Amino acid sequence: MPSGLSNIAATFIAIGRHHLNAPEDVIKALKDIHKRVAVNPRGMSPKNAERLAQFNDWENVALLLSLPDTLMARAEDSPTRRDSALAAMHAAALTILLSCPMRVKNLANLNLDKHLIPVRSGTHTYYSIRIEGIEVKNGEPIEVKLNARSSKILHRYIMQFRPQVSQAGGRALFPRSSDGMPRAPSNFGGELTQRVFRETGLKVHPHLFRHIAAKLYLEERPGDFETVRRLLKHRRLQTMMDFYASLSNQWAHDHYDEVVLSKWKGKPDD
């Protein structure tokens, strides 16, 4: 299928959505056409590969992994400020993305009653997240129990800072200040991208967390694509291999260098 058809279909979707305010059923029909003519490239896009390369530097990995704690600590220093509530909200969202990489639509639509399951253990509250398959793009349900650190950040946000984000009713985990409804995925994703860049200088959009998780895991367990498949809730193992084979290829080169080339000392100097 010529790649130009995919670009034309994508252009029609953009025109219908942003310029003509087309009804949702028309947009859906255009999306169906786009899917039928889309070219499915093997592997990761060059842009995502470039952004993922930021995490070849372990200092950048540490910056991202520690960011939720940094934001929450800052929020707690001035707990009554509006920007502190937003920092805490972003800390909670980033914590979830690091613990359970999900698409931004599912993240933005998380509901306290529908998707979060708190369990009290002594003085601590642990959270599980459960999203039914019907709500997920590929139909695979998401279910994960957050660890103690992640649960602590999420609990602090829910109990202390979420009421400051929005005083309107509603049970959205990440509510709009105006009416308490869930934040629009595109807007919320943009907020998180800007927050990460402002705090760390890293270019990271919410979907990249899925690639980051795969990269970090496969660097420790090369070739274990099945675990990554389960983590990212993909149906097909081949999808994982197409996207992330290059990571294992690099490990193979590094391992070859360590096992073979590093033993070659060359001829001694005369």
Image: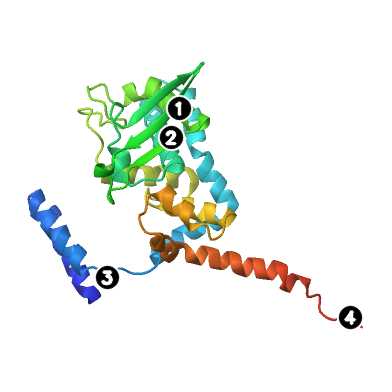
* Left or right position of 151 against 60: left
Whichever of callouts 3 and 2 sits on the residue coming sooner in the sequence is 3
Which residue is disc 3 drawn over?
39
The disc labelled 4 sits on which kind of residue? Asp
Quadrant of the image containing the N terminus:
bottom left
User: From mark 4 to mark 2, how far is it between C-alphas?
Assistant: 57 Å
Quadrant of the image containing the C terminus:
bottom right
The location of residue 107, given as percent across then percent down, is 33, 40
Whichever of callouts 1 and 3 sits on the residue coming sooner in the sequence is 3
Q: SS class of the residue under badge 3?
A: loop
Q: SS class of the residue under badge 2?
A: helix
Which residue is disc 4 drawn over?
269
Whichever of callouts 1 and 4 sits on the residue coming sooner in the sequence is 1
User: From mark 1 to mark 3, how far is it between C-alphas?
Assistant: 45 Å
Whichever of callouts 4 and 2 sits on the residue coming sooner in the sequence is 2
Looking at the rendered image, the disc whose residue lies closer to the viewer, 1 or 3, is 3
Which residue is disc 2 drawn over?
91
**Residue 212 seen anywhere in this rendered image of the structure:** no
The disc labelled 3 sits on which kind of residue? Val
Badge 1: residue crowd in 10 Å (few <14, some 14–19, many ≥20): many
The disc labelled 1 sits on which kind of residue? Ala
Which residue is disc 1 drawn over?
75
User: From mark 3 to mark 4, how far is it between C-alphas?
Assistant: 57 Å
Residue shown at the point (46%, 29%) measured from the top left: 151
Looking at the picture, tell me which residue is in the foreground, 141 or 23.
Answer: 141
Whichever of callouts 3 and 4 sits on the residue coming sooner in the sequence is 3
Disc 2 to disc 1: CB gap under 8 Å: yes
